[in-house]
Amino acid sequence: MNKGSRTANSLKSAATAVGGQALNILLKFVSRTVFIKTVGAAYLGVNGLFTSVLTILNISELGLSSAIVYSLYKPLAKGDKKTVSATMNLLRRAYFVIGAAVLLMGLVLHPFLPYLMKGTTDLVDVDLVYALYVFNSVFSYWFYAYKPAILQADQKKYVSNIVNNLVTIATVCVQIAVLALFRSFIGYIAVQLLGGIVQGLIGAVVVNKRYPYLKENRKEQLPKDEKKKVFKNLFAMSLYKLSSAVLSATDNLIISAKISTLVVGIHSNYVLILSAVTQLVQNIFSAFTASVGNLFAVEKKEKSEFVFRCLNFLNFWIYGFCAVCLWNLFNPFIELMWGKDMLFDDFTVLCIVLNFLTAGLQNAVISYKDACGLFWQGRYRPAASAALNIIVSLLLVKPLGVAGVFLGTIISRFLTTWWFDARLVHRHAFGISPKKYYLRYFLSLVRVCLVGGAISFATLPMQKYGAFALFVVRLALCLIIPNVCFLLRFRKTEEFKYLLEKIKPILKKIKR
């Protein structure tokens, strides 16, 4: 594949991802509003809890698809159809086993559900709802979920993006109709289950049409040495996938078990907004990462470290701006959308935003760590991070409530991931000390907190005029003040000038 084709496919993938994502986000907000007004916040808590439970169950996948996609690049480039088929056959068999494992683990966990659900509603058949969630996850593996891997490896991800976007949009629309007409939570979940099956079937048809040799070579198998390579990559990725899954899912489990399942429903509204912001930010960050080229094609470590600082600076600006906005707009927006009874107190909101910010500011480090393949060197860090997160969150949840859960995640991040991954990258990729990075990180946190706090304090008198007035004033200030402050402080730095040069060609393309 030539450079022009790769660029075109990348742009198509980005366009379909962002376009579909924007529409999906809008529909999810509409769906959430209808959900709360029709079946209530108690069901929202059950929905959030079971989603977190299945996130834990799905760690059995442990990055297998990523390892397979990586293994497909070379044979696809060479046109080696037999190796491609054999690799996809391995993924197909593995996904069937994983689906069976998720089903088994779901059955084993079922008797323990009452211990995870404090103050939950008795209006819903918990056993039936849980079964639907488990089968939804199982069927995602059994109904051709492995097929899109070849599209991603072949830089045709825009094809699966189109299919996924259309099915997701149709599914959400039907869910909204079911809620509005029948006020049925069971129907809502059943539609989601059916949508997943339809998505898998359509994806399989598309892949079979584009790659007919996959059906012809269903019995092809990889040689033992190739299988070893795949599973070696899988082992390295699985350690980090495990940590990520535990960190993302345990917050809701702890909140549900120690506080209330109803509070999980309130938290899920904040998660919905955070997920939308994070996805959009990741797309922006990925676009800039691609524009600087292959980071490891650069021979000199000094140049590579400079590119890292540029990406880190970009990351600070984007996440810092988003954190200021979230800090000031979270509660006014949620009050306008879903009412005052869906709000957390200001301190809890601050902890949620700090959790988002401290994680986001590590994006550049994570990108470099993955690109360098520095998994084995830090193989014990994910387990330490996950275990510490659970322990500290459990210790803090009783005295501090919901805020304690997020503080536990932040503390465990600083004690493990933050310093260790940065040290790993700087020592192995750049051959330098990470001390300057640590200093820049803390200065970034201070700047964001000062700007966000100043806007929050200055607009406190606006609260007496209602949520709408407060939201409008804060939105205007959040759009202007952080960006002006960052621009005045960094406009003369090398990193800013370098990124500005990278932005200019993108802006020219947009104008055309």
Image (tube, grey):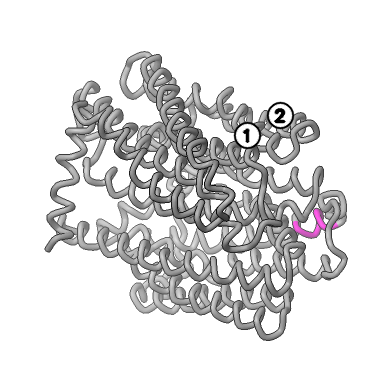
Image vertical order of residue 236 relative to residue 442, above or below? below
Picture coordinates of residue 209 (x, y %)? 36, 79
Cα distance in 3D space between marks 2 and 1: 8 Å
Amino acid of disc 1: Thr
Q: Nearer the viewer, residue 235 or 380?
A: 380
Secondary structure state at the residue bearing disc 2 = helix
Q: Quadrant of the C terminus?
A: bottom left
Residue shown at the point (54%, 79%) measured from the top left: 173
Q: Is residue 64 visible?
A: no
Question: Is residue 71 rendered to the left or right of residue 466?
Answer: left
Image vertical order of residue 182 relative to residue 225, above or below? below
Choose top left, top right, bottom left or bottom right for residue 338. Answer: bottom right
Choose top left, top right, bottom left or bottom right for residue 50. Answer: bottom right
Q: Residues within 10 Å of mark 1 (few under 14, many from 20)?
A: many
Residue assigned mark 2: 392
Region rendered in magenta: 106-110
Q: Earlier in the sequence, mark 2 or mark 1?
A: 2
Question: Is residue 41 rendered to the left or right of residue 306?
Answer: right
Assess whether residue 178 is covered by the magenta stretch. no
Residue shown at the point (40%, 31%) measured from the top left: 365
Picture coordinates of residue 270 (x, y %)? 59, 52
Choose top left, top right, bottom left or bottom right for residue 318. Answer: top left
How many marks the image carries: the answer is: 2
Q: Nearer the viewer, residue 326 or 43?
A: 326
Q: Nearer the viewer, residue 52 or 284?
A: 284
Amino acid of disc 2: Val
Q: Residues within 10 Å of mark 2 (few under 14, many from 20)?
A: some
Secondary structure state at the residue bearing disc 1 = helix
Residue assigned mark 1: 409
Q: Quadrant of the N terminus?
A: bottom left
> Could you tell me what secondary structure mostly forms the magenta stretch?
helix
- Disc 2 vs disc 1: Cβ atoms closer than 8 Å? yes
